[in-house]
Image: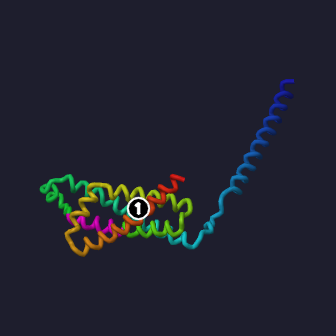
Amino acid sequence: MLSKFKVVVMVVLTLFMGLSAAQAANKKALIRMRQPQKVSPVSKSWQREVVSDLFAATASAENLDSQLEPLMNAAGFSYIQKWKRGIDESSLQKTFSKDLKSHLQVMAMLFDKHTQYKKFDRVSEFEFQNLVRRSDYILSLPVSKNAIQETMGGAKFASEFKTVLAEYNKVRQRFDSKSIQLALK
């Protein structure tokens, strides 16, 4: 009697294990079928331009971020500490100002494209909004303001930078006014 019971339990357990293994195999097949295929989504031709400009703006913002730490450190050191460490603050400021000017040019172009195309696709719009915040942060730092003021000594660079900054401010104010209008609706 006990041996028959053991045989029945073994058969039931074997059937149960076989069924659970079969269900697991089916789940694996379903999971494999759900995986997305490696194809690129169809996008409008202007979106490709926007994506390349976003990459350029992101790269320039990251470059500016990497330059901020040495600038902040240099601003905190005395003249003797800068001399001992071999830090040339004026060259750091000039490089930062030139890179900031090119970043503002790219951002002004992106603001114009945003106005022209009304809105980017979801990912590009998210990236654009992050870039706007990042640019605002970089521009709001006292180190950035000091670097700009120190490099305004050259007449040619000063006039170019003022032109770029005026264009950036114009498109930025236009963008902000549209954002406020959308929020009021």
Please state if 21 lies on the left or on the right of 114 as rendered.
right
Q: Would you identify the image quadrant in which residue 11 lies?
A: top right
Please state if 115 lies on the left or on the right of 108 as rendered.
right
Residue type pointed to by label 1: Gln
In front of the other: 159 or 51: 159
| Local crowd size for mark 1, using a 10 Å CA cut-off: few (<14), some (14–19), many (≥20) | few
In the picture of the structure, the residue carrying the numbered disc 1 is 173
Q: Secondary structure at mark 1?
A: helix
In front of the other: 167 or 57: 167
Image coords of residue 110 (percent x, y): 45, 67
**What residue is at 82 percent from the left and 29 percent from the top?**
6
- The N terminus: image quadrant: top right
Image coords of residue 15 (percent x, y): 81, 39
Image coords of residue 85 (percent x, y): 18, 58
> Is residue 33 on the magenta stretch?
no
**What residue is at 53 percent from the left and 68 percent from the top?**
117
Please state if 134 lies on the left or on the right of 17 as rendered.
left
In front of the other: 162 or 72: 162
Image coords of residue 66 (percent x, y): 33, 59
The colour mode here is: rainbow
**What residue is at 21 percent from the left and 56 percent from the top?**
74
Find the magenta span and give its range: 90-102
